Amino acid sequence: MSTLMVLFIILTIVMLSMLIWRTCSNYYKLPCPSWLAWMVEHDNPFNTVTRATTIVNHLDINVGMTVVDIGCGPGRITIPLAQRVGPSGTVVAMDIQAGMLDKVKEKARTAHMNNITFLQAGIGKGKLKPNHFDRALFVSVLGEIPNRQTALKEIFNALKPGGMLSITETIFDPHFKSRNSVLKLAMETGFKEKQFFGNRLAYTLNFEKPI
């Protein structure tokens, strides 16, 4: 089989998988299933805004901070976050799917990282400690949450005063949320807009919990 044919087959599988996921997402608030983790495990080569290093750089993280990666998936952002906070910091990898957390655990073991804890839960269920986190982030996750208002209230309470919530969205995500809808939701919860990076099709919005 020629290399061109192999590439064509791989591209066809990817496109069909994305189509199935996007179609299902029109009817249900579905997270990316763990069997499709390979689709969200690596940076999109066509989108610099949502690359892991870019997102982490926009978080203004210091060594020793406590961060929660909500809907962490296979850990594309979790591992760079853990590297940035260092051994004295902590990253909570939070996901509703055990299969996704298993993938993060394997990456952490391979990288010999001991500063990641794992929480299998959905946001909005009251599982996060109040006034505990310096940073919280959603990366292509917000649209998957049925009750977004409840979710953001839990994050608001879980952040320390002055803590930052970072929300990244891309049009490639079936659950894409526009900048205006994210702004409205976050500000109604009590957050203050802090920074915007990117454009209307791929962006990161950072919010601050008032001191």
Image: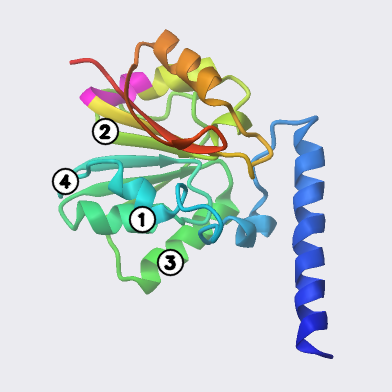
Q: CA distance from mark 3 to mark 2?
A: 23 Å
Q: Nearer the viewer, residue 169 or 29?
A: 169
Label 1, label 2: how far apart the Cα atoms are:
20 Å
Boundaries of the magenta span: 156-162
Q: Which mark is residue 145?
A: none
**Residue at horizontal 44 percent and vertical 21 percent from the top:** 152
Labels 1 and 4 touching (C-beta < 8 A): no
Rendering coords of residue 164 (x, y %): 29, 29
Find out whether residue 207 is within the magenta segment: no
Which element type, helix, strand or loop, lies under badge 2?
Answer: strand
Q: Residue 3 falls in which quadrant of the image?
A: bottom right
- 120 or 186, which lies in front? 186
- Mark 1 vs mark 3, CA separation in Å: 17 Å
Q: In this figure, which residue is indicated by the disc labeled 2?
A: 133
Residue 53, disc: 1
Q: Nearer the viewer, mark 3 or mark 4?
A: 4
The x and y percentages for residue 54 are 36, 51
Would residue 35 appear left or right of 89 to someone viewing this image? right
Residue 176's spot in the image, x, y percent? Answer: 62, 34
For residue 211, side relative to residue 99 (left or right)? left
**Which residue is rendered at x = 55% and y = 18% of the image?**
181
Q: Circle 3 is placed at which residue position?
A: 107
Residue under circle 4? 62
Mark 1 or 3, closer to the camera = 1
* Numbered disc 4: secondary structure: loop
